[in-house]
Amino acid sequence: MVFSRLLMRLGVVLGLGAAAAQAAYTIQDSYDNTNFFDGFEFFDLPDPTNGFVKYLGAVEANALSLAGYANGGVYLGVDFNTTNPVGGRSSVRVSSKKTYNEALIIADIAHQPAAACGSWPAFWTVGQNWPNNGEIDIIEGVNLATNTTYTLHTGPSCTFSQGDCNAPGTGNIGCGTSSGDTQTLADGFNEIGGGIFALEWTSSAINIFFFPRTGDIPQDIAAGQPDPSTWGSPSTSFSGSGCDIPSHFKDHQIVFDTTFCGDWAGKVFSSDPVCGAKASTCEDYVSNNPSAFKDTYWLINSVKVYSDSATNSTTKRGTSTFKPRRFTA
């Protein structure tokens, strides 16, 4: 996300690899509709992925009801009223003020941005000095995609069964695999009332779990005592001797964003038979069809970060006095 993606990342599931060792996790941070914006900051610079988007700061986004506490959760939306927006369609991108290492991150999400031509939403973690400190994409898809793509991006010398995470030598494509589950993304996710994604990042494995709202969500998650060793196989596991995880993944912020077009959604827009028939370019469609993005929003119940060690330090990045108004979306 902090770089140009040239191609849709592809991968195959060749095995789950070694499971992370059992650990006793304790709560480190909890973000919800009482404090989320105390712990997250807004990115309001030009989109590094060259999207047709204008990221707004906290005050403007809240005033326009694009970010705040709404409908019982944390709302992060986009402008669905303006035709031909100057500089791109307004949206938000937020990052945690703290950075994390080898954590268990559990996100309870009620709604993801709906499938829409031109859209590119994502929930991910990333370190500075990209790609050398790594990126972990947990939820990501473009246009009318129906499955999330789990992908890692790193510097050189990090390979898993899913591929070379520095591919094609720049990290732009990375190593990844489709979830193969339509309940993990967009409309399929929203139809079941959402669900829970968990990222277990240890020194030996990066595991991603998904629990649909209508399925069997582990009771230990609700109890605040998560134990991934009892959850069964993850949706995907990145592990093995081909990558020294601690040296390739460091000091990650947690990020939610929605951009449009750009280096992925824009690149493949015309190759989608449905989207390609709607407009000559991705930018033309996004610019002239604001109502198509009414359901392009995140509604987050909570994000909780757990640690199995007091040595997993965090660094807080600045403070903010922003106090968002509540609204109904």
Image (cartoon, grey):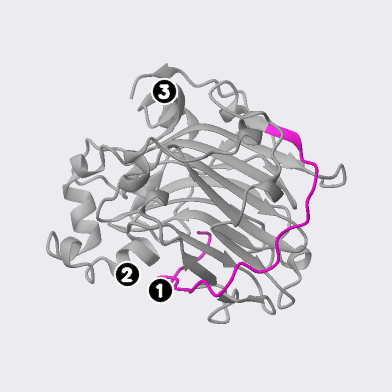
Give the distance between the C-alpha atoms of the residues marked 3 and 1, in whole angstroms: 35 Å
Kindly indicate the quadrant of the structure image that contains residue 323.
Answer: top right
Whichever of labels 2 and 1 marks the residue nearer the N terminus, that label is: 1
Query: Does 324 sit above or below residue 148?
Result: above
Is residue 251 part of the magenta span, yes or no? no
The image shows residue 220 at horizontal and vertical percentages of: 66, 35
**Magenta residues, as a range?**
1-29
Q: Which residue is mark 3?
A: 70
What numbered label is drawn on residue 7? 1
CB-based contact (under 8 Å), mark 2 and mark 1: yes
For marks 3 and 2, give the one nearer the viewer. Answer: 3
Q: Is residue 7 magenta?
A: yes
Give the CA distance from mark 2 to mark 1. Answer: 8 Å
Separation (CA) of disc 3 from disc 2 = 33 Å
Q: Position of residue 255 (x, y in %)?
A: 55, 46
Left or right, residue 146 beside residue 278: right
What x and y, as percent, mark residue 45? 48, 49
Relative horizontal placement of residue 151, taking residue 101 as reference (left or right): left
Predominant SS along the magenta part? loop
Q: Quadrant of the C terminus?
A: top left
Disc 1 crowd, CA 10 A, few/some/many (<14, 14-19, 20+): few
Q: Mark 3 or mark 2, which has the lower sequence index? A: 3
Earlier along the polypeptide chain: callout 3 or callout 1? 1
User: Residue at the spot x=44%, y=73% of the render?
Assistant: 10
Q: Height in image: 149 above or below 119? A: below
Instruction: Return the x and y of residue 252 as percentages of the image width and height.
Output: 67, 52
SS state under label 1: loop
List the residue tagged with mark 2. 267
